Image (tube, rainbow, N blue to C red):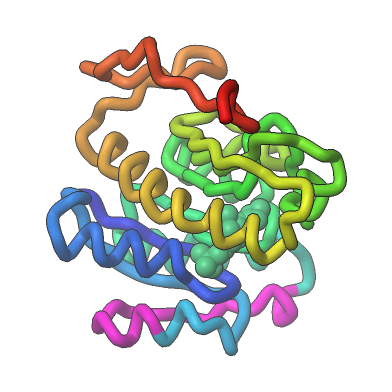
Amino acid sequence: MIRLGILVSGSGSNLQAIMDSCVCGDIDGMVAVVISNVEEAYALKRAENYDIPTKVISHEHYPDRVNFDMQLVKTLKEFDVGLVVLAGFMRILTPEFLKHFPGRIMNIHPALLPSFPGLEVRQKAIDHGVKLSGCSVHFVDDGVDTGPIIIQAAVPVYPDDSKEELKDRILALEHKIYPRAIQLFAQGRLDIVERKVFIRDQVKEKTAYMVNPPLED
Ligand code: GAR
């Protein structure tokens, strides 16, 4: 059973979906520890409600990013974590962190990468006028939102969308694809070849597509 170390900074709705998936058996794993760099993060409450150990490690208390990251690594290793899951963790990890968990760090991003990496991406998608956006689960490499993509899901974007409307539409899908990606990892079904992720025994749905606006009224 895989031991997950989840890093958070905010509300923790993805954490909630992952904890629920562990409880109901959709993920063959358990959340070993939840670490927040923000003391007031609601995600910590969610973890406490499930009796999951929590730690606050504030980046503000460390002289530089490497020292902060090394404290994260030490804590994750204390809890014998097999997969590091970034769930709304708003810090960029250093190469020093990455080398402790090669191929074992995942992130979720609220856009269809490689479009709109970085911050404020829902507003950027609306302002650009895209018709489809979505979310991406990817392995973390040393770039910003550049690692090999595991799963993506698309939603329509409407010209009069508010940032909140698009956020909610995307978040509902995040809660489905993140547990799925973690379960594929837990089952040992993900192979990374260069920057492509191959999923063993994947059902290939060749007729699935989404058009927005629809082709017919
Ligand atoms: C999610 O929308 C996630 O995709 C995003 O932060 C939100 C966290 O929500 N992550 C990033 O933007 C990372 N670059 P949550 O705390 O409710 O899970």
Decide which of 159, 15 is in the foreground and name it. 159
- Whether residue 115 is situated above or below residue 89 in the rendered picture: above
Decide which of 19, 153 is in the foreground and name it. 153
From the image, which quarter does the C terminus lie in?
top right
Task: Say if the magenta span includes residue 57.
Answer: yes
Snapshot quadrant of residue 151: top left
The residue sitting at 32% across, 79% down in the picture is 53
Q: Quadrant of ligand 1?
A: bottom right
Is residue 216 found left or right of 2 in the rendered image?
Answer: right
What's the magenta region? 46-62
Task: Say if the magenta span includes residue 184.
Answer: no
Farthest residue in the right direction? 127
Q: Position of residue 136 (x, y in %)?
A: 54, 39
Q: Position of residue 137 (x, y in %)?
A: 50, 40
Q: In this view of the protein, can residue 70 be seen by the observer? A: no
The residue sitting at 45% across, 68% down in the picture is 13
- Whether residue 135 is situated above or below residue 211 in the rendered picture: below
